[in-house]
Image: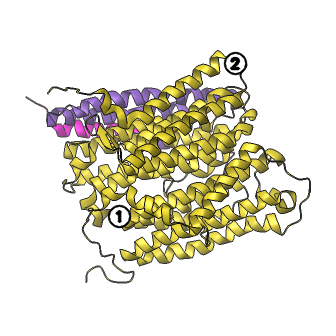
Chain colours: A purple, B yellow
Amino acid sequence: MTIPISYYLILSAIVFFTGVMGVLIRRNIIAILLSVELMLNATNINFVAFSHHLQDLGGQVFVFFALTVAAAEVAVGLAIIIALHRSRSTINVEEFNLLKW
Amino acid sequence: MTFSLNLAFSDLLPLLPEIFLTFWLCVVLIVDFSFPRVPKERLAYLSVAGLVVTLGCLAWFDMNHVSGTLFGNMFVLDRMAIFFKIVILGATILVILVSIEYVNRFTLFRGEYYCLVVMSALGMMFMVSANDLLSVFVSLEFATLGFYVLVSYLRDDLASNEGGLKFFILGVLAAGLLAYGISLVYGETGKLVFSDMASAQPTPGLIIGFLLIFAALGFKVGAVPFHSWIPDTYHGAPTPVTTFLSIAPKAAAFAILLRIFLVALGTFKPIWVVLLVAVSILSMTYANIVAIAQRNIKRLLAYSGIAQVGNVLIGLAAGTKMGNDAILFYLLAYLFANIGAFAVVIAVSQAIGTDEIEDYRGLSRRSPFLAFAMLLFLLSLAGVPPLAGFIGKLYIFVAAIKEGLYTLIVVGLINIVISMYYYLIVVKQMYINEPIDPSPIAISGPMKTVIYVGLAGTLVIGIYPQPFTDWVVSATLMFANFVGPSVTIIPPGASLGG
């Protein structure tokens, strides 16, 4: 028995919205970074499901690139977080409120 | 399913500028760490030399009509791509020249700064050539990764850290939205290349997917309601990076928007015109009203930039070839005025150490040249004849009138008046108020060059726009046979039921 594609799409939508809510609600920068990873991985589920459904390799190729981009983003993000932690000794986004309007 | 790659060496010609710039980037990096005693100023000139050669190569392509696609339609070199690449490279050269003095404020990694600037420029060159959603995603992130680091380059400065953090969080959020949107579009159409999507039907999944992609690109160009990172990031970032950020990524993102809206989404024009009109009105009105309250010149220019994006979106909403020509022309005029204005800001902040508008009092006594240059740049941004910004605004409004977007024109004209007010606040500080400290301000050679280039561009394009309009008209020839479904915008007050 094959699993219909809608199951994959619902799963990826749930993961994606968990990620979006995480970015909007969490206050710890590491948690925000993890939530973004969830969003990108939801995308990967979508791509693999569609790729299989459409019998087209384009989607699977996209997944490789999405993984690479996600890794690069995390590397840069962690570097910024370390620099922040050195100067402010906190990584809570609410503490960064110097610039307004 | 098998893939085959048949690529002759000569097929790589359209990619030559990128290949050369990648090579040159490595050269600059190797020189930087192999010869640590070499003054960093020389690295700047070394990078500029590479960029100038690339620019020459592109000019040669433009004159000889070199064009083509590579890698299964993922990379396209057409005249529009060449136009945008020239604009981006020009901006990069000017930004490196204004950075030379500023870089001394960095405690570490002064050489890598130039590499990162060139790397971001390289990413943006790929962005404007992106012809499918995969290359859009990869090149957009490529360009933005360099900017994440550049914005937080002043490591000991809290504002720079905070600006970098906000930019990073919203940037990766936008990347997530973009990727998810692309996956939905791919699922609905089975295609990634723009031109293959042209016959798609507007299904709900496709519309949601494109809305997500539009939101992500809206983050990049900084249109309301996706603008929240712009003021803080522009304020916190080192000023040369702000300069770069306010021109090049916006131009590159507009190239992608043009391709998506006109090539991939041409048949959906009645749907997206409404969206673009709304975003354009919001951007212009919100940014111009908030800009009045600003005390910091970088934040003022940030909000002015959001308002300018609103103006450019008018041209996109027109959705005709003339609208595209107007967008290209406007971006060219905006490049010179904005880079000039930021160069003055950098020169002043080098001398007096602040960016507050209050501290510009009496600038005309301290440095008549800087004050006069700033006056012209601000007037060009506001759209006063006979400067470049005026022709740009006129071009965009005429394109919109031809499509009957009268509401947009009225809102645009009201906004010009509002923007004039806050630009003139700066002018009043410079010319009417007396300086507290009347000592003259010294300007370095490279900075002077950039300001002269900005002045020349602003005046020449404004007084004699003919060659430039010819250039943009020929750059968008590929849209000449674009005939979207004609649009009738419902005039305000008319009932929808009728």
Q: Position of residue B217 (x, y in %)?
A: 43, 49
- Gap between marks 2 and 1 measured at Cα: 51 Å
Q: Name the residue under label 2.
A: B36
Mark 2: which secondary structure? Answer: loop
First reached walking from the N terminus: tag 2 or tag 1: 2
**At x 46% / y 37%, what residue is drawn?**
B123
How many marks do you count on the picture? 2
Residue bearing the label numbered 1? B321
User: Closer to the camera, B234 or B193?
Assistant: B193
Q: Verify CB contact (< 8 Å) between mark 2 and mark 1.
A: no
Q: In this view, does B411 lie to the left or right of B45?
A: left
Residue B234 placement, left or right of B174: right
Q: Judge whether B64 appears above or below B265 on screen.
A: above
Q: Is mark 1 on a helix, strand or loop?
A: helix
Q: Which residue ends up furthest to the front in the rendered image? A: B64
Q: Which amino acid does label 2 sit on?
A: Pro
Which residue type carries mark 1? Lys
What x and y, as percent, mark residue A75?
A: 51, 25
Q: Residue at 37% across / 27% down in the picture?
A: A67
Q: Can residue B487 be seen in this view?
A: yes
Q: Can residue A27 be seen in this view?
A: no
Residue appearing at x 48%, y 44% in the figure: A24
Mark 1, other Cα within 10 Å: few <14 / some 14–19 / many ≥20: many
Task: Between residue B9 and residue B77, name the one nearer to us.
Answer: B9
